[in-house]
Image (spheres, rainbow, N blue to C red):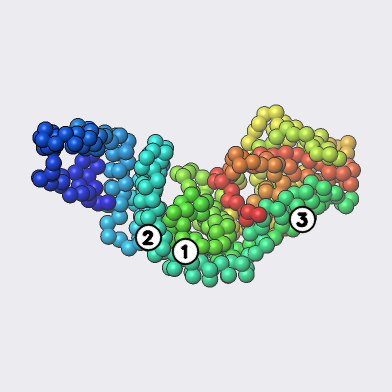
Amino acid sequence: VGTWSPGGGGGGGGAPDQTGQLTLADLQGFVQTNANLNPVIGYYNSRFGTRVSARPAAIPDYLLAAAETFRKTVGALGDKDELNSWKQLATGADGATLRGWHAFTSDVRIRSGPHGRSLKSLEDRGAGLLRTAIEPQFNPKWDALYQRLASCCSGQFPFITESRLKQERADYAAERPTGGLSIRRNLPTIGQADVLGALAEVGVLSDAYAVDPLLGGAEPSFDFIQQNRGSLAVARLWQRFISGASATASTSLAGKPGGPGGREISVLALDREPGAARRSLKDRVSQITLFDRGVILRPSTDIKSQRVPPPFVWRLSSSDALLTISGRNEQSGEGGWTSTYEVTGGPLKLFYFIRLASEARTELSDPKVWTIHVQIPDGKNPRDLLEGAFEIRLDEPMPPILPN
């Protein structure tokens, strides 16, 4: 590929030597002395005459441009080994990008044209050389790490399936108070030791083999991950989310686990009708504290004004503390009361609860924005529930859980 010269020249020998070949004049001379050779004139004109007179087909500019892009991409890889070549492509370093590699197949005009199949085979052939070399290096390491991950974290958020979460959402929606002023729910998640241990090792392995472009299945021709891709994707994306890694430049308070930063979260009160057998939270509660004691909302006024309290910061170092939703009634005629919904569990229980209490979502839903419904006992009638809706906005998209 490095010897290509798109637009002419290169990639082949010189013009064929036509010395000694019969010409039309030769055949016409033969026919003058032997009329039986007349049919040869027509045969010659139909087979060879068009070749002499026809001009070479013009090569489209877009095909030339794609060929030049592909040539430069391959050339930028130099003589590196397969793993370093892949890492260069995956990270876009030093002029080699996956976009440049797919210069042919990313253009629908080329892909659907007469050369589309052969040019795709060219891309796939080169990708296959890298994949075949990297597979036996990566997979034994990932398999060993997966066993550790399954041992410590299986069945704990975020290593739970969508089908399990769907059932838990149904249980949450059907929850009934027992008559007291507090409800408690346990949401088991992986622990801090798992985050700083197995999850951190997933991050190291992922960086060493530049797996990020492969996690969503967007690069099948390069894909050297042979099994347990779903677990790798969940582990890697949550490792980046927790560590404060940001996909884009951001002024958020993101930082390293246990350090000064974390994930920045803001809350907005919404006007939504409560579910069946629920009373609107704003009818009974004058003040609600949501997740963080600094996030204080007054539903009856904040819904109208759309006031957003200052964001709070989730930090791994302090995330084992009890997660509390607290509603306070300040009406003197009712004697004043406070009721709570408390969440226990591991350090990721806030994000577990957001998924548990969220409205139905689609593939088009913004993974940074979640509408949740919270519920607390009604202090006036403790066997009833009050419900309110809130918009939770994260500084980075919340990673997925395991697919079904």
Three-letter code for the amino acid on which mark 2 is drawn: Leu
Q: Give the image location of residue 380, x and y in percent.
A: 88, 42
Q: Pointers 3 and 1 in contact (CB under 8 A)?
A: no
Q: Quadrant of the C terminus?
A: bottom right
- Residue 292: horizontal and vertical position, in percent? 66, 48
Point 72% across, 46% down: residue: 357
Please tell me whether residue 104 is drawn above or below residue 130 in the rendered image.
above
Q: What residue is pinned by disc 2?
A: 129
* Comes first in the chain, label 3 or label 2: 2
Q: Position of residue 397 (x, y in %)?
A: 56, 46
Q: Percent position (x, y) of residue 394?
A: 58, 44
Distance from disc 3 to disc 1, alpha carbons, whole Å, reads: 35 Å
| Label 2: element kind | helix
Residue under the point 54% across and 63% down: 227
The amino acid marked with disc number 3 is Arg
Residue 317 figure quarter: bottom right
User: In front: 245, or 228?
Assistant: 228
Q: Are marks 3 and 2 in contact (CB under 8 Å)?
A: no
Label 3 or label 2, whichever lies nearer to me, is 2
- Nearer-the-camera pick, 157 or 162: 162
Q: Which circle marks residue 205 in the picture?
A: 1
- SS assignment at label 3: strand
At 13% from the left and 44% from the top, the residue drawn is 21
Name which residue lies at 65% across and 64% down. 154
| Left or right of 284 in this view: 5 | left
- Per the image, the residue denoted by label 3 is 185
Element type at marker 1? helix
Check the image and report above or below for 30 versus 237: above
Q: Is residue 262 left or right of residue 64?
A: right
What is the CA distance from the residue labelled 3 to the residue labelled 2?
52 Å
Left or right: residue 12 compared with residue 287 = left
Category of crowding for the residue at label 3, using alpha-carbon neighbours closer than 10 angstroms: few (below 14), some (14–19), many (at least 20): few
